[in-house]
Each structure stands twice: as C-alpha cells, then as structure tokens.
Image: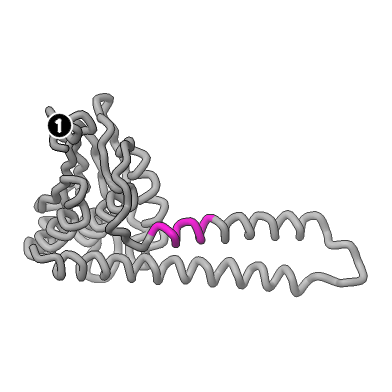
Amino acid sequence: MSSDVGAARWLSVHDDLLRGLAHAFSNRVATVSAIAALFDSTRVPDERVLTGLRMDADRLDGLLEQLRQLPRRDDADLEPLMPGDSVRAALALFEHHPEYRDVGCTVVVADDVQPVRADPLALQHALCVAMTAACRVATGRDGTARASVRMALSTEGDVVRIEVSTDGSTGEGDADALALDAGAISWLLARSNGHGHAYPYGCLIELPTLKASRRIG
C-alpha cells in the first residue's frame, strides 16, 4: 500500500475521533458555563458547585491530553513499552468515536505478552484503525451494534500479536475495506517494524518483541 493510501485511511479515522473529542469538549464547556451562571458575586459559592467545577476542569484536562495523542510525528522516538498500556490508551481515545463508542470491547491479555519497541502514538493510532475495522463489522447498516469486539494480546515466538475482531456472528466484513485498514496499520507501524493483516472479522497487528527488535536494529 502506498503511503498516500495509508495516510488517507488513518486520516478518516483521525477525523472521526477529532469530531468525537470536539463534541465531548463542547459538552464539558457547556456544563462549566451553566455552573458559572449560577454564581452570585455577593455570596460564597456553594461547595458542591465548586466541586462540580473542579471535576469538569479535570475532565477537560483529560480531554486535552487525549487531543494531544492524535497528531502523528515521523520523528518520534521508538520506546520500549508494554502493548497492554497502548491498548488501554487507545480504548480511552476510541470511547469518543461518534459512531462506534457504544460497541463493547473485551480485552484478553495472555500471561506471556512481551514488551515491544515502538512509537507509542503510532501504536495507539494503529489500534484505533483496527478498532474501527472490527466495529464496522460488528455494526449493522442501521448503525446498531450487533456484536462486541474482542482484543486479544499474545506472543508467538518473536512476535507480539494483537487480534482485534468480532466473534463472527455478524458475518464477514468487506474484504477490500479490511485490506485498506490493514495497509494503514502497516503504514503507521512501519518505523516500528510492525504489520497489519486483514481478518474476515477484523484485523491483526504484529510487532517484533523488544528482544527481537534489538536484533533487527
């Protein structure tokens, strides 16, 4: 897959996530504005009102941190990391997807999962692409979630595998669309020596273990 096609596929996912985050920001700002309108400058604010403001400020700070995770950086350092940490960060970001945030996801982590050497944000982005692919398979044409998504992490030899797919109860996904998703994952993880593969019900991400990546150089 060319870099242009991979970039275009990622940008479509990126724009959906950005739209979802913008909606979440708007909701939080509206809440803060509503609370601020209750203030009476002649009285000390109720402690419950102040607590609500602090909570919304924390939520806004969290949304801002997630917003910082969206841009790609071609010059980012490759770092040793545990794939499970990237999965948790990606799922927190994907919760804001405007179409698929209601699709349930189960994460299964095998005891033998090894660390990898990767660009942390690129791996999060690749996971979001894989989640989008699986959620598309899990969702009917009317937008209703008809199956949940399963994310399974394991190690086979020198390779860490992250399979993101449905249980197959909704039938196979569009092969051409899944091939584009897998290609975008490979493009995102090229510097990390990672690869994406299309499955009938989602995508598979493969990355060399940290030990193997040191041999690769």
- Say whether residue 141 is magenta: no
The residue shown at (33%, 66%) is 99
Amino acid found under the numbered disc labelled 1: Arg
Q: Quadrant of the N terminus?
A: bottom left
Mark 1: give few (<14), some (14-19) or many (20+) Cα within 10 Å. few
Q: Secondary structure under badge 1?
A: helix
**Magenta portion: prevailing SS class:** helix
| Residue 180 in picture, x, y percent from top left | 12, 63
Location of residue 147 in the rendering, given as x and y in whole percent from the top left corner = 25, 53
* Residue 109 visible to the viewer: yes
How many labels, in total?
A: 1
Most foreground residue, 59 or 48: 59
Residue 208 falls left or right of residue 11: left
Could you say which is closer to the camera, residue 117 or residue 108? Answer: 117
> What residue appears at the point 50 percent right and 59 percent down from the top-left corner?
63
Identify the residue at horizontal 20%, vertical 70% (top origin): 8
Relative to 94, does residue 193 appear above or below in the rendering? Answer: above
Q: Circle 1 is placed at which residue position? A: 215
Q: What percent of the width, then of the height, locates residue 98?
A: 37, 67
Left or right of 196, for residue 52: right
Residue 65 in magenta stretch = yes
Q: Is residue 148 visible?
A: no
Residue 43 sits in quarter: bottom right
Q: In the figure, is residue 56 to the left or right of 90?
A: right
Q: Which residues are magenta?
A: 62-69
